[in-house]
Amino acid sequence: MTLDERVVLVTGASGPVGRSVAETFAAEGARLVLAGTDRDRLDAMAAELSLPAHRWVPAVGDLRDPAGGWLRRRVQP
């Protein structure tokens, strides 16, 4: 499977399962939107996985937010 230049949204990316998912998709060439509640953990994970800045973008927020739309406010095309 190759995901060259496809964009993958990984929720829970600051946790262990999200990290594993992100690592798998990154290895297949996908660009990543890493969504989680802790920006420092997202940055640390991206550094540990050696993700270049142009291959990922953080989306910090809580999907359970009743106001909704948190991702739309944080990620610009």
Image: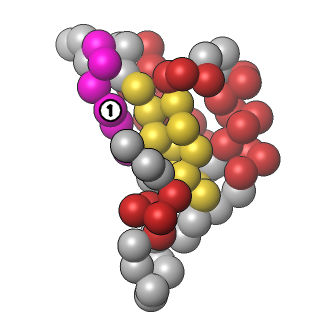
Q: How many marks?
A: 1
In the rendered image, the vertical position of residue 61 relative to residue 14, given as above or below: below
Res. 42 in view? yes
Residue 70 at x, y percent in the picture: 47, 69
Q: What's the amino acid at mark 1?
A: Val
Dot 1 corresponds to which residue?
Answer: 7
Colour convention of the picture: secondary structure
Residue 71 in magenta stretch: no
Seen in the image, is 61 located left or right of residue 44? left
- Circle 1: is it few (<14), some (14-19), or many (20+) Cα within 10 Å? some
In the rendered image, the vertical position of residue 69 relative to residue 55, given as above or below: below
Q: Which residues are magenta?
A: 4-10
Q: For the residue labelled by badge 1, is the local secondary structure a helix, a strand or a loop? A: strand
Residue 5 in magenta stretch: yes
Q: Quadrant of residue 68?
A: bottom left
Q: Residue at x 52, y 30 (%)?
A: 56
